[in-house]
Image (cartoon, helix red, strand yellow):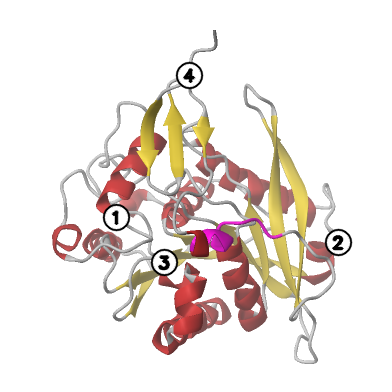
């Protein structure tokens, strides 16, 4: 007789964990929203001015023996592209537990992003918790930069990057908890020789910076479909090292448990926050701590918007204000890239 496995954790709509350790990421939310997490197949032909392909970047040593891959986005060349394009390494969000680099929610944003910013985007498929708790995703982000270095040195091959990419102008960008990875990866490479690659900037968009004690914005602001307190708590509990809480440096880099910010060698940062993000106050706390540590950091606020609003394709299509705010966000990131 086969014993039925028992549900031990349920993050509504996104994730189920059973007593045998198995994880089910089948979408159980509103059916009309399912398309946003569905994978998009790569296409090397240009569609609406962008081509995409998946590449193997490295072997990551795990008990299962997995391969590290990334999704590349290349904008179609225009008459104005008279020089090589900046390279932007993108870390997706999802509380370190859900969504993938090829999910439609990122495809619809980063195809537009590379068209508007005239950049090449490299988005690694990050190992996910709870099967792979942090620092696994951080290791994957660092491995992507190291692979880029190999390509720049001619020790690995990628025709898109070799022909079109400017290895002297590399940026990190991350959505939600992907923003945490921007900080962690940038901090790690601060003492590493990446030449001939030059990391010149990091863009943190609505990063998952929190504390174990609720902030005022967490308590007072309304929750949204992309962000509830229960979802936030559950995902981070599954992702952080066992025995840790939200004061861990991975989620609270401005806290007392984290390495002092003034001792880190970091590139210029752009911190993007949303006015109605539950994590707004702790994101601002990070901003103030970075300023106090004399780090170069700019701030951009999307007024009236909630966490990761631009990933919601339904809202972007139906609400002109959301669409305009997404355009403004991309334009501000474009300015940051062009400045550096």
Residue 337 position in % (x across, y down): 55, 76
Judge left or right: residue 183 versus residue 199: left
Q: Which residue is mark 1?
A: 228
Residue 245 position in % (x across, y down): 27, 36
Q: CA distance from mark 4 to mark 2?
A: 50 Å
Judge left or right: residue 314 versus residue 64: left
Q: Earlier in the sequence, mark 2 or mark 3?
A: 2
In this view, the residue in front, 117 or 94, is: 94
Q: Residues within 10 Å of mark 2 (few under 14, many from 20)?
A: few
Mark 4 or mark 3, whichever is nearer to me: 4
Q: Are marks 4 and 2 in contact (CB under 8 Å)?
A: no
**Residue at screen point 44% across, 89% down:** 320
Judge left or right: residue 194 versus residue 331: right
Q: Are marks 2 and 3 in contact (CB under 8 Å)?
A: no
Q: Are marks 4 and 3 in contact (CB under 8 Å)?
A: no
The C terminus is located in which quarter? bottom right
Specify the segment rendered in magenta.
33-40
Q: CA distance from mark 1 to mark 4?
A: 30 Å
Rendering quarter of residue 278 = bottom left
Instruction: Give SS at disc 2.
Output: helix
Q: Which residue is mark 3?
A: 308
Q: Are marks 1 and 2 in contact (CB under 8 Å)?
A: no
Q: Which residue is mark 4?
A: 4
Judge left or right: residue 151 versus residue 199: right
Q: Is residue 252 visible?
A: no
Give me the disc on residue 156: none
Q: CA distance from mark 2 to mark 3?
A: 32 Å
Q: Is residue 310 visible?
A: yes
**Residue at screen point 27% across, 42% down:** 246
């Amino acid at each position: 007789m086969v014993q039925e496995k028992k549900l031990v954790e349920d993050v509504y709509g996104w994730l189920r964990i059973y007593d045998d350790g198995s994880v089910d990421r089948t979408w159980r939310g509103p059916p009309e929203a399912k398309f946003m997490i569905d994978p998009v197949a790569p296409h090397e032909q240009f569609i609406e001015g962008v081509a995409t392909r998946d590449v193997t970047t490295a072997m990551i040593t795990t008990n299962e023996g997995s391969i590290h891959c990334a999704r590349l986005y290349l904008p179609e060349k225009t008459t104005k592209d008279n020089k090589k394009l900046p390279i932007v390494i993108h870390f997706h969000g999802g509380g370190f537990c859900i969504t993938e680099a090829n999910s439609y929610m990122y495809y619809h944003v980063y195809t537009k992003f590379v068209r508007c910013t005239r950049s090449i985007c490299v988005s690694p498929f990050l190992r996910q918790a709870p099967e792979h708790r942090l620092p696994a995703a951080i290791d994957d982000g660092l491995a992507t930069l190291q692979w880029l270095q190999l390509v720049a040195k001619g020790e690995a091959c990628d025709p898109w990057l070799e022909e079109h990419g400017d290895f002297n102008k590399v940026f990190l960008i991350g959505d939600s908890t992907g923003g945490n990875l921007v900080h962690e990866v940038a901090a790690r490479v601060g003492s590493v020789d990446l030449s001939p690659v030059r990391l010149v900037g990091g863009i943190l968009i609505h990063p998952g910076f929190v504390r174990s004690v609720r902030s005022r914005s967490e308590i007072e602001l309304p929750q949204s479909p992309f962000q509830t307190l229960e979802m936030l708590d559950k995902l981070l509990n599954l992702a952080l090292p066992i025995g840790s809480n939200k004061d861990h440096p991975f989620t609270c880099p401005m806290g007392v448990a984290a390495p002092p910010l003034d001792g880190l060698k970091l590139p210029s940062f752009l911190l993007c926050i949303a006015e109605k993000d539950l994590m707004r106050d702790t994101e601002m706390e990070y901003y103030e701590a970075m300023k106090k540590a004399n780090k170069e950091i700019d701030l951009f606020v999307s007024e009236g918007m909630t966490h990761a609003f631009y990933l919601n394709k339904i809202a972007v299509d139906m609400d002109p204000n959301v669409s305009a705010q997404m355009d403004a966000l991309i334009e501000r990131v474009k300015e940051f890239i062009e400045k550096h």
